[in-house]
Amino acid sequence: ARLATVAAGDRYLQAAVMSSANADNIHRILRGVLAASSAGGSRGPALQALLGLAAKLGGRETMASVLEIVIAAEMQDSRWKLSALGTVLDALGRKQLKLEDVIDAAAQRRFEKILDSARATAADNDAASQDRLAAITLISKRPSRSADAIDLLSELLLPQNPAEIQNAAIGALGSLNSPTAASALLDALPSASPAVRGQILDALLRRDAWVPTVLAALEGENLSTSQIDAARRSRLLSHRDDKLRTRATKLFAATNVDRKLTIVEYQSALKTPGDTQRGKTVFGKVCASCHKLEDVGHAIGPDLAALSNRTPEALLVAILDPSGDVDARYQGYAAANVEGKVFSGLLADETSTSITIVEPENKRHTLLRNDLEELRATGKSMMPEGIEKDVTRAQMGDLLAYLASTTPKPKSFPGNKPETVVADANGQLTLLATNGAIFGGDIVFESPYQNVGYWHGENDRVSWNVRVPESGRYDVYLDWACPSSSAGSAFRVDGVQPVLRAKVASTGGWDRYRQTKLGSVSLAAGVQSVTVRPDGPPKSAMLDLRGVYLVAQGKTPAFAFAQSKVAPSPTDPSAIAAVLLDEGRDKNERQALIEDNPDKAAAIVGAMVADLLPGSAQQHARIPWIWRVSVAAGKRNDTTQLKALLEVSLPTRGQPLSDWQAVVIGGGIVNGVSLSGVWPGPRVEQLLKDNPDLTRRWNRSLGQAAKMADNEEVKSGTRYDALRMIALEGWQKRGAQLLKYLKHENAELQMGAVSALADLDSPQATSALLESLPKLAERNHKLALEGLVRNETRMTALLDAIESGRMKASVLGKEQVEALRSSSEEGIRKRAEKVLGGKQ
């Protein structure tokens, strides 16, 4: 238990404690850590780890002992006690034990008092947010009081509460397998903001037993189908239960017949050429209150100039049936305040204390959550139905002509000429990068591969006008290239029914094109507009697109380009090493090989250096990729992989420390482990344990690294790696040497010293980092600050320096401020709030 108390802030001592714990002693270890907590010691990670271990090890008696210890514990930070109790109650549930099964009546009474206090905290609007969140999590974990919990959690779902409180209440209700909890969630849907609504729907759809309740609400029109977004709709339409899937299909296939009839009646507006000037007048009269074009109107609704499907047919449907396929961002809301005033419009913004409703003509109303009587989604687009009452068929033709005339001009590139796509003899529509209209920011047409690339923004897109020969079902094929490092961005194909959504898969490189079927869609005869665009922010460059093919369903597509023959990725370490060292290969492809073969890191490095002679000039040409393999292994922090990498890279007896070896050890293992959030010194000690030969080689290499760090004939980058290594010998032996490089004019060597001291968990290293801050280069200054929030001891020293005036709070970056304010130590959090004030 004493070791556990000392180990509370050291993950490797914690590991030693964990390995010695068993069902017989876990309660004594836990009591020791809790004693440290009551004295103000560090508790978070150690406590949670111990409770998790107790849950695995313990039977009824162990769980009883652990629960009684936690209930009786005196803790300065109440949220940790609530969290600890929640962890133990979860463990009881998994073991199918009740509270009454494991503790006596007296302990139960003490627990009920804690639960009552948690309920009061959860309901207290003036309580700290983190305390309320911990309390909300706990109150749902007492089955015998679930009715009381549901009543309170239902109140917390009201829009007067901050979104984070509402989300916590949703999670708590979702953990209760109760029809009453499902009803509470359903009742909250109409007043929920889009973000909160999504969380509620996820909670409801996560339990099969609750799905019929959702469908019943939709069937009874207590819930509008327009409130179910595409992703959740898809979950219902593909549900594993046949009966539920059939009910969902019937619901979402339903269409507003009146709107359909109106659209049919206005088809004549498509047949007569309209007048753009008269159309502009119509726009100003009926559209400008919420839309803006050519400096006329208010930009509240969607940007009409950026619509992906601007054909007259599509625009007519969108105007006459605005709620047929409403974007959640533009769904209408009605908000009533305590004074009885009602505001209807878009939910434009929300914070923890207020919401903002925007009405037509850009009238903005900010309402405090405490003043809200009701907030309800209308289930309809903010754009009203019934525009036909104000617009004749002739005026509609004019309006459509005007909207079509405001289409932005596409970007212009040699080799790209937008044109209407017509079907070939087989009925295939071939939409190529060469004949599409390109819109957006960085997006370009690239001649070498005849593709559209550099998709960096949400508004980047390619559109084609296509003349569909006959209505029917079409298979959609994609021809694209993308390396694994850029894969994963969501994209969509608009102008087809249904809209196709997918994520970009890797093809192995920017120069490796593949073709695949995306899905099947319906297309109506006539001219349609088909657009490919990101479905949210792209991860990086979304993809290189050569073409989209619309083929009559079931037929074989005729691709404009030969299908790529992609060689399978190598799996042998020597073959992988050869690819990594081939500068002619795509960098992203090579990085993907590293990521796909984590267990072969040591063998790959061995193959990369197998033919290197001492002092070889090839060494530094290979080092960048040797480093990539090594630092990836370091960040994974896998014991087997790291031991194998040390075996490969540590010099043997009589062998000098080569540059590549310093790179693997210092720049790869030490640096990577540190980047993963682990102190590298104790970690390496753990790796060397019970391996005398490896330990001797390690100790010799540190002496060699100390000499390498001071050798001016060695490249700065390698000296940096040597400095990272010697920090692991400790302050007493290497502190003076590291201090020398803190003042060095070479920024790379200074970086080595800063990073090394950041890895050295000692008071002297902390002081050195603090004192050096004013003299460090910009990047090194940031690294030093990152090192100073690495644990609670350093955070305390940092706050001491600010409070004493030795440094200004303004030097802290956003990340350091956040680290201080979210520390696991309540004392540090309070000091940070006091010292940093309103600094963001």
Image: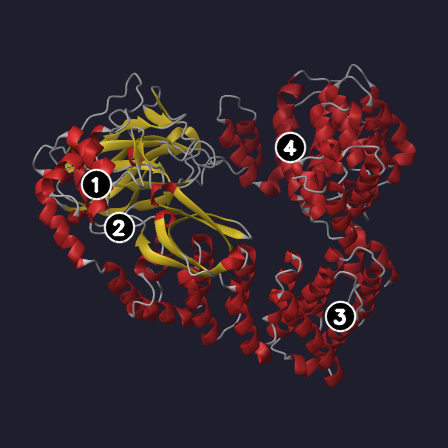
Cα–Cα span, label 1 and label 2: 15 Å
Q: Nearer the viewer, residue 51 or 458?
A: 458
Mark closest to the chain's N terminus, 1 or 4: 1
Mark closest to the chain's N terminus, 2 or 4: 2
Label 1 sits on residue: 315
Image quadrant occupied by the N terminus: bottom right
Question: Could you tell me the amino acid type at mark 2?
Answer: Pro
Q: Is residue 610 visible?
A: no
10 Å crowding of disc 1: few (<14), some (14-19), many (20+): some
Question: At which x and y percent is residue 14?
Answer: 78, 55
> In the image, what residue occupies the spot 12% across and 54% down?
261
Q: Is residue 759 above or below residue 617?
A: below
Residue that protrudes farthest toward the right in the picture: 732
Question: Could you tell me the amino acid type at mark 1?
Answer: Leu
Question: Could you tell me the amino acid type at mark 3?
Answer: Val
10 Å crowding of disc 4: few (<14), some (14-19), many (20+): many
Label 2 sits on residue: 384
Q: Is residue 792 left or right of residue 554?
A: right
Q: Nearer the viewer, residue 730 or 572?
A: 730
Label 3 sits on residue: 70
Disc 2 to disc 4: CB gap under 8 Å: no
Question: Could you tell me the amino acid type at mark 4?
Answer: Val
Mark closest to the chain's N terminus, 1 or 2: 1
Q: Is residue 831 above or below residue 462?
A: below
Which mark, by number, is residue 605?
A: 4
Mark closest to the chain's N terminus, 4 or 3: 3
